[in-house]
Image (cartoon, rainbow, N blue to C red):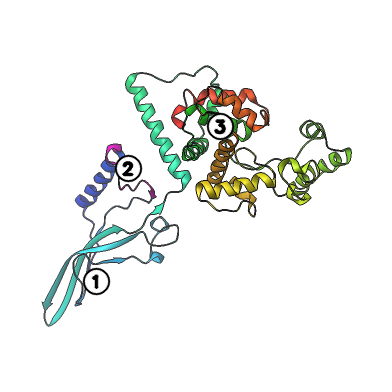
Amino acid sequence: MGNLKYISEKFDSCLNTYRETFTDQSKIPSDSSSSLQQYDSAVILPLDFSLEMDGISGIIPNSAFEVPPEVLPKSYLTQKKESKIGFILHTIDHNFNNNKWTTKITGQTINLRFDPLSAEEKARREANKAQTSNDIIAVENGDFPTTAAGCTRQATSLLGKSQVVVNIKLIANALKTLGVTNKNAIASICAIAGGETGLVPKSEDHVYKLKNLQGVFPNLTTDQQKRATAKGITKKEFFNIIYGEYAPGRVGNKVKSDGGLYYGRGFNQLTGRGNYEATNNSLIKKFGINVDILKNPDKMNDVDIAAKALALYYYDRLKNVNQNDANYFKKALLATGNDANGGYKKKAEYHACLMSDYQFLI
């Protein structure tokens, strides 16, 4: 066997190369090039190795072999549990001494595979890059951001959350794919989603006090109100009453059990079999995604699916509204159901922030 030799000069050289490369943004390729920014991989420092063995033929320089995944740490494995690294040979020496033939091979580590970035991680990196650029320009100009009129601390608190930053980028990208590029239009839709669900896809709540239930669903019978507020009622039982018994045709449900399946989910609480079916068809047609949210309605809470579904919802309902219309925000509220879940003031604050201090997100 040969030896793995630690040489401090070579290690320091590798480490300095790593520091220089990954802290200087100018050395990272742009998205338009054959970039590795679309992939996720742990940084692997080059490792030289040498190995001496009994004489062997058939090995030539630039031969490579893969390191078995079972001997590697998890950070060096792909999501599919495949090895990310291998070794490539650059020197091969044959020696004949005392009637003994030995072969010494020398090489170094190479990257073999990378995991594609998830949509969330791509959006996070884009948002971080935009924020960093925005901050640098502001500092260089001595132009530190000030809070715009209507952009409250409550709004900035939500829009400053890392997951919300990612989600806004996903929504904006989905809208742009559909041709909605106007910043006011994108800000309007994101602001409304902020008021509806805090810009985090989630399922509709099913626990109500009687007074609140009467306010939200005023036409329920006394019996329905009693059953819907019973202690320990499940989500499915609750929505079978609310959307299965109570005006089911309003949201496109066909049978009572549809109520317990197609309750509100996603960024804008998509509700009803009819809406789920229409959205499912549009996801296939416009984005080429076939997740079948009719069979798997909880997929509506997948952040990428939720972002595309939200974009499709407003793209369809506002097709007759010019995206450059100055009143797009108000018209988008009407398309939501005349400010469906209330909170107009809060949505207006989010809109103000996204059109001022947080415009880099959209």
| Viewer-proximal residue among 25 and 31 | 31
Q: Position of residue 79 (x, y in %)?
A: 45, 57
**Reading the chain from its start, which is encountered first: label 1 or label 3?**
1
The reply to whether discs 1 and 3 touch (Cβ–Cβ < 8 Å) is: no
Q: CA distance from mark 1 to mark 3?
A: 65 Å
Residue sitting at x 38%, y 18%: 143
Q: Position of residue 337 (x, y in %)?
A: 67, 31
Residue at the spot of label 3: 189
Q: Which secondary structure, mark 3?
A: helix
Single out the mark in the foreground, 1 or 3.
3
- Three-letter amino acid code of the residue under disc 2: Ser
Q: Which secondary structure, mark 1?
A: loop
- Three-letter amino acid code of the residue under disc 1: Met
Q: Within 10 Å of the Cα at label 2, are there few (<14), some (14-19), or many (20+) other Cα atoms?
A: few
Residue sitting at x 38%, y 57%: 76
Q: Is residue 120 above or below residue 47?
A: above
Quadrant of the rendered structure where residue 56 is? bottom left
Q: Within 10 Å of the Cα at label 1, are there few (<14), some (14-19), or many (20+) other Cα atoms?
A: few
The magenta segment: 24-39
- Quadrant of image for the N terminus: bottom left
